[in-house]
Amino acid sequence: MNKLKSGDKVKVIAGKESGKEGVIAKVIRSQKNGKSALKVVITGLNISKKSQKPNPQLGIAGGITLIEKPIDISNVMLIDPKMNVPTRVGFKVDSKTGKKVRFAKKSGEILNN
């Protein structure tokens, strides 16, 4: 179970987009030098330009397009839904259902899974 999931509201704490907030579009798991690394794509943040060649068979027009680049998961923090401040994420077993759930460490509120 990952600490961050798509749809979570996060704040960037390091890098050129530091201090900005957004919603996670997708979580990317990659393998590098035998170690797994998690990255997140945040809607509207870390945008760069990419030159695109035209491909008439796929209906792609050529030109310069804007794409959202991934950010390392260590550079973002979840925003607590109750207090609206960045917080860490923890795991605990819910006493009612007996399932493992995520919770915000600052407020103790259970996050939607």
Image (spheres, helix red, strand yellow):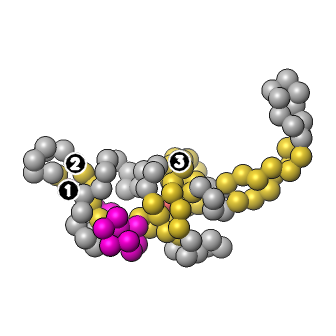
Crowding around mark 1 (Cα neighbors within 10 Å: few <14, some 14 to 19, many 20+) is few
Q: Is residue 103 left or right of residue 4?
A: left
- Image coordinates for residue 72, horizontal then vertical, percent: 55, 61
For label 3, the residue is: 26
| Mark pair 3, 2: CA separation | 22 Å
Q: What amino acid type is highlighted by mark number 3?
A: Lys
- At label 1, the amino acid type is Lys
Q: Is residue 2 left or right of residue 38?
A: left
Please tell me whether mark 2 sits on a helix, a strand or a loop.
strand
Label drawn at residue 3: none
On the image, numbered disc 1 is attached to which residue?
92
Pointer 3 and pointer 2: residues touching (CB < 8 Å)? no
| Sequence-first tag of 3 and 1 | 3
Which image quadrant is residue 87 in?
Answer: bottom left
Question: Which amino acid does the dot numbered 2 rest on?
Answer: Lys
Q: Is residue 85 magenta?
A: yes
Q: Residue at x 44, y 67 (%)?
A: 77
- Residue closest to the eye, 79 or 89: 79
User: Is 48 rendered above or below residue 25?
Assistant: below
Mark 2 surroundings: few (<14), some (14-19) or many (≥20) residues within 10 A: few
- Near mark 3 (Cα within 10 A), the count class, few <14, some 14-19 or many ≥20, is some
Name the spot of residue 42 as percent of width and height, x first.
57, 57
- Farthest residue in the top direction? 57
Q: Secondary structure at mark 3?
A: strand
Regarding residue 54, the answer to whether it shows in the image is yes
Label pair 2/1, CB-CB below 8 angstroms? yes
Q: Which numbered tag is attached to residue 100?
A: 2
